[in-house]
Amino acid sequence: MDISNKGWMMKRLLLMTFVAILTVFSLSAPIPAGAQSARRVILIDPGHGGSDAGVKIGEKASEKDVTLAVALLMKKALSGGGYDVLLTRTTDASLSAADRVKAAASARPDLVLSLHVNAGFDKKASGFEVWFPGFQAAAGNGGGSKAILKDMAKNTYLNESVRLARAIEKNLSTVFPKASRGLREAPVPLLEGLTVPAVIVEIGFATHPEDRKKLLDDGTRQAVAAALAKSIREVL
Ligand SMILES: [Zn+2]
């Protein structure tokens, strides 16, 4: 969503929503270790929905359709493996930021994965991006990714997010060969008390012809869902 300043603002808004969701988790009372269920709760957030279509992908599909399709396939791929997979939406429903936060609060997830599709001014931009919440201070200190990673090491849950992001980068590379745009640290306010690993995955560019073809292809959606499910199984 790097189309313009507006696109950047949208991205920031998206990340702020994401942070709000995570903040709710950190406010909920921790479950005593002994009482913790062996089943792990995975919350998948298919971006957009209803009147908010997201970026357009071809004549008949939009970002909201792709994110929902992949989310439903992920649920299928993870079922039976000791996971309870919950979605913030299972239909083409409009969800406000507050709705997503509410859904997340009642889910009490062990891991959160939010799905989006990218778009760029540069028609050559392609591939996937994995974002994880990090420290604004680290992002703004000019120290580059090394400094960011050093700061992130202070927080176990951010570490977990990085592990998940790396697993996704590795596994999605088989679906989008040599197309990873790297791991991105989102410039969001300092996240203290983050308690679950969480990432945003932007699966391909709607503005790139090849990516678009893939996003509209059932087989590729299946492969993306399988790669993301595999990544979750690797870290949780
Ligand atoms: Zn989006």
Image (tube, grey):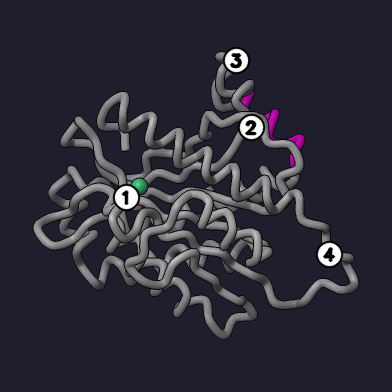
- The kind of secondary structure the magenta stretch mainly shows is helix
* Extreme residue toward the left, this view: 59
Tag 4 secondary structure = loop
The residue at 20%/67% (across/down) is 217
User: Residue 136 vs residue 7: left or right?
Assistant: right
Cα gap from disc 4 to disc 3, whole angstroms: 36 Å
Q: How many residues crowd around disc 2 within 10 Å: few (fewer than 14), some, or many (20 or more)?
A: some
* Quadrant location, the C terminus: bottom right
In this view, the mark in front (4 or 3): 4
Kindly identify which residue carries mark 4.
Answer: 31
The residue at 38%/48% (across/down) is 202
Give, as a three-letter code, the residue at label 1.
Answer: Val
Q: Which numbered disc, 2 or 1, marks the residue that appears first in the sequence?
A: 1
* Quadrant location, the N terminus: top left
Asked if the residue under mark 1 is in contact with the one under mark 4, i.e. CB atoms within 8 Å, the reply is no
User: Residue 224 vs residue 28: left or right?
Assistant: left
Any atom of ligand 1 within 8 Å of the CB at mark 1? yes
Kindly identify which residue carries mark 2.
Answer: 149
Kindly identify which residue carries mark 3.
Answer: 141
Q: Position of residue 141 (x, y in %)?
A: 60, 15
In this view, the mark in front (4 or 1): 4
Q: Which mark is residue 117?
A: 1
Q: Is 162 in front, or is 6?
A: 6
Q: Is residue 211 above or below residue 148?
A: below
Cα gap from disc 2 to disc 3, whole angstroms: 12 Å
The residue at 28%/55% (across/down) is 51
Q: Which numbered disc, 2 or 4, marks the residue that appears first in the sequence?
A: 4
In this view, the mark in front (3 or 1): 1
Cα gap from disc 2 to disc 1, whole angstroms: 25 Å
Q: How many residues crowd around disc 4 within 10 Å: few (fewer than 14), some, or many (20 or more)?
A: few
Q: Which numbered disc, 2 or 3, marks the residue that appears first in the sequence?
A: 3
Cα gap from disc 4 to disc 1, whole angstroms: 34 Å
